[in-house]
Image (cartoon, coloured by chain):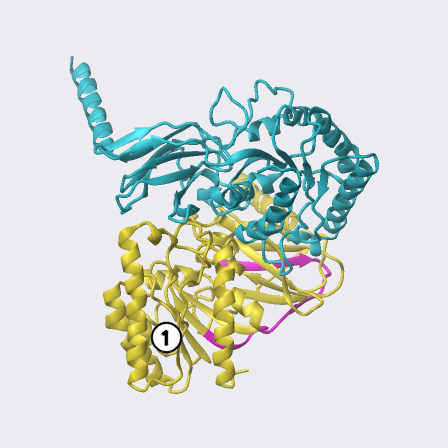
Chain colours: A yellow, B cyan
Amino acid sequence: MKKLTTLFLGTLLFMNNLFAQDQGKRFYKLPIYGKYFETSQQFHRVDTLKYNTMPASVKKLYTNSAGLFVTFKSNSSELYAKWCVTDKKVGLNLTAIANKGLDVYIKNRAGRWQYAGSKGTVKTCEDGLILEHLDSTEKEFLVYLPLYDETTSLEIGVEEGASFVELPNPFKRNIVVYGSSIVHGASASRPGMAYPALLSRRTGFNFLNFGVSGNARMEKEVVHMLGDINPDVFILDCVPNSSPEQVSERTVYLVSYLREKHPNTPIIMIPSVIRELSYFHQNWNNRNHLQNANWKTEYNKLIAKGGKALYYLDTSSLLGEDHEATTDGTHPSDLGFMRMVEQIEPFVLDVMKKHNIH
Amino acid sequence: MKKLTTLFLGTLLFMNNLFAQDQGKRFYKLPIYGKYFETSQQFHRVDTLKYNTMPASVKKLYTNSAGLFVTFKSNSSELYAKWCVTDKKVGLNLTAIANKGLDVYIKNRAGRWQYAGSKGTVKTCEDGLILEHLDSTEKEFLVYLPLYDETTSLEIGVEEGASFVELPNPFKRNIVVYGSSIVHGASASRPGMAYPALLSRRTGFNFLNFGVSGNARMEKEVVHMLGDINPDVFILDCVPNSSPEQVSERTVYLVSYLREKHPNTPIIMIPSVIRELSYFHQNWNNRNHLQNANWKTEYNKLIAKGGKALYYLDTSSLLGEDHEATTDGTHPSDLGFMRMVEQIEPFVLDVMKKHNIH
């Protein structure tokens, strides 16, 4: 009996904590956008059971929530979130906000998504206030999920009594961006600064983050997964981790397979950023230039064979000329991502215009 | 006897490890630049025993090695470093590179400092390879110390047999930058991107980092410490953490004290960045604008009283117009710091020109 009483009191105490914690707030689960596939694990970008033959590291990385977001409308003056990630350590070249945190935008009066706040964590489960002292007008919110971790749950909280309405994905069309850690988001300072997310907000188009850190070597199993997507544009930024030999051996298969499955979809090839460390690191210097030279050669071959709707972003420097735009010599900081976007955005928009994609 | 043998063998093993670790390398301690004062603790920016009456938090922060650097010449093809910091956790809005890491520049053929590599750590003591595969020409190196931690030791290593020569401080004159976390370096992605460091490399002048995160409230004891400096220019960026009332109450004392001690030294007042979170956070919105309005009012009063060599950087937005340039709504990312520098640099250079400071 004593045991039962303790259990009962314990339960009461637990419920009371739960109540106290959530007093005056109401939490919601929301549809997850920023991905193409329906996945059995809603916070995964790709169903890794379905695409089971992809390399283990690639499968693991597609469980990271890079590029995923939720969106809703509310007049709450405070915004809360509860979310869980894994116990993986924060990367040395990332902030805890980018790695495991949330990043919030609000649609401003000019109709543009404007940064409003972000919250980092090193905990497995975080529960906290994200924004406060908002005015009482109804506003549209967009919340980006962690870039470099698997999100396992997410609930958005507003004040009890505040309005709350789920919104559809505000970005139209689908543009797949397949690439390495740079697409994945290293070293953005927060989730919304990964370059596909930046492009979505700036253009209104839905750039989908298929970045896989340390990978994107055009493995056939990954190519086949990409071929199952039916987007409006493919952007291939998969040179950084492919050896010069892999670039020569695998590019034709990647592009031809996508072309066979999608005869009219524009495909844009982006060269690797020149790693800032490569200007002094002799091995990287040679390798980096050879990677890009081979990529361009494969493009030229494909064009010579009659390749249609295939485009190459010809640039000697995606990161500007002052050598200041990376965090670690390889990964763009927000400064680097902004410079990349300033080159990639007009190029992609031109291609889309040419193909009447609005 | 057995115990002694074990101890002896243990010691041998330890020495052997130490030898193996350093085999083929030679380590050097170097003079620390980037600070004005001689300090009994060489990695502190200010002698906190001498300026013992400053607020405890300010004293603690001046033990952080923000803005400090070493410089040398070597033809080594590899660069190593051993350094120790405290066991303080990495800040949520910082990378481990910025917080506890090293950031390396090499003087390029155009005579400009060019980023070469950086290394983050979460260890108290790190020992590792920083650069490799350098060509065998003799090069000038500049290594920035951790921004947000106390460095307790630093040794730079090169290959055994490589040349190694200490170099004098490459930056001329002294420009004191007194400010908050933003001057201190949050949220630069690496130590060399804090804005005083960026300004030094871009102009060749020695911008000294007197930033103290969460502080810089113009406390009299800190003002007196600043008055003991005899620089070529004072830059005051101390509005962000001062309440509007503190700005009104303390600015005249700060500026007048510095003027009294240094009758001819230009003093530049910089308004606070508009915190990105303030566009939606009603309290911050009011506070942020009031802080800057009061700062400008105090400037106007000082000018009206005949203030000489006093300048105000009049700008409505140090961070640009797209609201994307902070990591957490308050602290500039590298994107934000670059935008700040693009406004601060020409203003400061104009003032210096006017005062014949070359």
Quadrant position of residue B233: top right
Per the image, label 1 sits on a secondary structure element best described as helix
All told, the count of numbered labels is 1
Q: Is residue A170 magenta?
A: yes
Along the line of sight, the residue nearer the viewer: A22 or B323: B323
Along the line of sight, the residue nearer the viewer: B331 or B310: B310
Q: Is residue A187 left or right of residue B57?
A: left
Q: Is residue A287 left or right of residue A126?
A: left
Along the line of sight, the residue nearer the viewer: B132 or B284: B132
The magenta segment? A153-175
Q: Is residue A10 magenta?
A: no
Residue at 36 percent of width and 51 percent of height: A277
Q: Is residue A222 left or right of residue A148?
A: left
In the rendered image, residue A38, in percent from the top left (x then y), is placed at: 45, 73
Along the line of sight, the residue nearer the viewer: A264 or A58: A264
Check disc 1 and report the residue beneath it: A226
Residue at 64 percent of width and 68 percent of height: A112
In the rendered image, residue A8, in percent from the top left (x then y), is placed at: 57, 45
Q: Main secondary structure of the magenta part?
A: strand
